[in-house]
Image (tube, coloured by chain):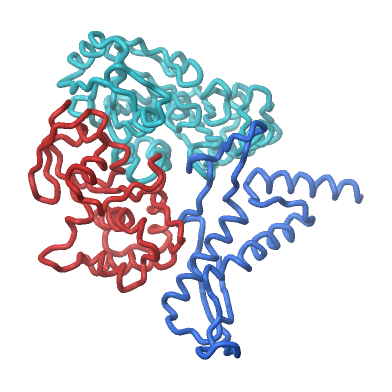
Chain colours: A red, B cyan, C blue
Amino acid sequence: MASVTLTVNGRTVSADVDPRTLLVQLLREHLHLTGTHVGCDTSQCGACVVHVNGRAVKSCTLLAVQADGAKVVTIEGLAANGKLHPMQEAFRENHGLQCGFCTPGMIMTAVELVNRKGNNLDEHTIREELEGNLCRCTGYHNIVKAIAAGAKAMR
Amino acid sequence: MYKFAYHKAKNVKDAAALLKKAGDSKLLAGGQTLIPTLKLRLAGPAALVDIGGVKELSGIALKGKDLVIGAMTRHAEVATSKVVRKAIPALAALAETIGDPAVRNQGTIGGSIANNDPAADYPAACLGLGATIVTSKRKIPADKFFKGLFETALGDDEIITEVHFPVPKSAGYAKFPNPASRYALVGVFVSRNGSDVRVAVTGAGEGGVFRVAEMEKALQKDFSAKALDGIAVKPRGLNSDIHASAEYRAHLVGVMAKRAAASAA
Amino acid sequence: MKWTAIDDFGIVINPMIVEGQVHGGIAQGVGQALLEGAVYDKHGQLVTGSYMDYCMPRADNLPSFNVDYVVTKCPSNPLGIKGCGEAGAIAAPVAVVNAITNAVGHEDVPMPATPQAVWAAVQKSAKLRKAAE
């Protein structure tokens, strides 16, 4: 067993885990934060994207022990004081989700994208930056619209 | 995943000692290839030595005529670094085509090179720029580093610490991605540094990354896409799979080499 | 690149949901035409078992779409509505593959028309042209 201590959505948590435990397993199975999804499990689909020290990463391709000491933010950590994050609000406004499975990863990717590239995102940039997020439904049209609107709203 | 013991290294020396002590062990850098490999049980090391916390392995600097990149430097850092963009813009552009944004935030240059995936991008840059791979034990020229599919000159307890890229006069990289995985179906890196002209191909070769002497000769005389007219790479020795036959890959090597040369001019 | 889809769904009650179905259908149709193929080896083993080999449409494979309607009320139900689930998938593969066959000059183009398949089709065009000369 290995012990890990990390901050998840502002809360310090410690756990003794088998070193094989993936970050997404720690989040979903130990902390019951089931908003982060496992889609492909081969690090293509992006349903499991969370922020580790401010960087978007695929939590199905990171051991929990690698995140020891890190600050992790999941989809559950975006809304503040019962109010949706502007990116979440934009997805709702623009029908940016159909079945909703890819949505947590899409939103976490989108928020980091805005943090990196700013609030004015053109369609081409958004589509290229979504390379690691798959939507089977496949509602990219509205996801792209939602991210452009969410980016502006995050100003 | 098979069971493994986990060790966190404090520094390079510590990591090398842990590797040696643990025996059947693997270094864990970013883990973007290793973890999927472990999940599929394609590897089952007894121990992982995590160098994620070794700060001395990370960083980008221009030292003399070399661009020096630390082994744990993430793809995203190389892609966005002002130093890299100024010294070797083709290298920054290459890093930006690896995986996707989340993979680039976590994957490292050292991990990519040590793994030597036959469709990875960095091996093409190392060979195409005549880089030197610095390890915990020695300096290895790229020409002697890549030994075949997933094989390198690295010893069991040897750790890549830095990669030294000589800053070329000009360089270019063109990649035709596999539509599904977005790894290189074929990627060609070309560079010119005085009389040293290099053409390195990834994604295509059965034995991993390789140089194309005939193209290098032609580019030595005239460093332009046009100089590559009529030079065909033979399909023999090239990969053939569901995504591309050896014939198609051979064709793509020609096209990508021209695009790389054109972008370098 | 511009993509326009016009459908007749009868009376449209919730345009937001209906347009989502058209968007998704088009994307899946483009996937079918260009990207998605399940391949088995000669032993019957699926070799496209992960997204490393099975090509899902990504956002950068597609443009945004213009969606519009012609409304003909359906006479056989009181709401005048028709089905719309994934309707975009009907015309999308046809439109894409027609564009390719038009460009290469013959109809021997498989689905999915992967880069390699289109390359092979172009080689065939060159052969056909030579034979015709």
Which picture quadrant has residue B8?
top left
Which picture quadrant has residue C38?
top right
Q: Nearer the viewer, residue A119 or C52?
A: C52
Image location (x, y in percent) of residue B113? 39, 25
Q: Is residue A49 left or right of residue C93?
A: left
Residue at 40%, 36% in the rendered image: B91
Which picture quadrant has residue B59?
top left
Examine the rendered structure and indicate whether residue B17 appears above or below residue C87. above
Residue at 52%, 76% in the rendered image: C67
Q: Nearer the viewer, residue B264 or B117?
A: B117
Residue at 62%, 56% in the rendered image: C33
Question: The C terminus of chain A appears in which quarter of the rendering?
Answer: bottom left
Examine the rendered structure and indicate whether residue A32 appears above or below residue C62. above
Residue that lies at the very extreme toward the front in this rendered image: C77
Image location (x, y in percent) of residue A16? 14, 32
Question: The N terminus of chain A appears in which quarter of the rendering?
Answer: top left
Image location (x, y in percent) of residue C118? 68, 48
Image location (x, y in percent) of residue A39? 38, 48
Q: Is residue A137 left or right of residue B133?
A: right
Residue at 17%, 46% in the rendered image: A31
Q: How many marks?
A: 0
Q: Is residue C117 left or right of residue C2?
A: right
Examine the rendered structure and indicate whether residue C94 appears above or below residue B189. below
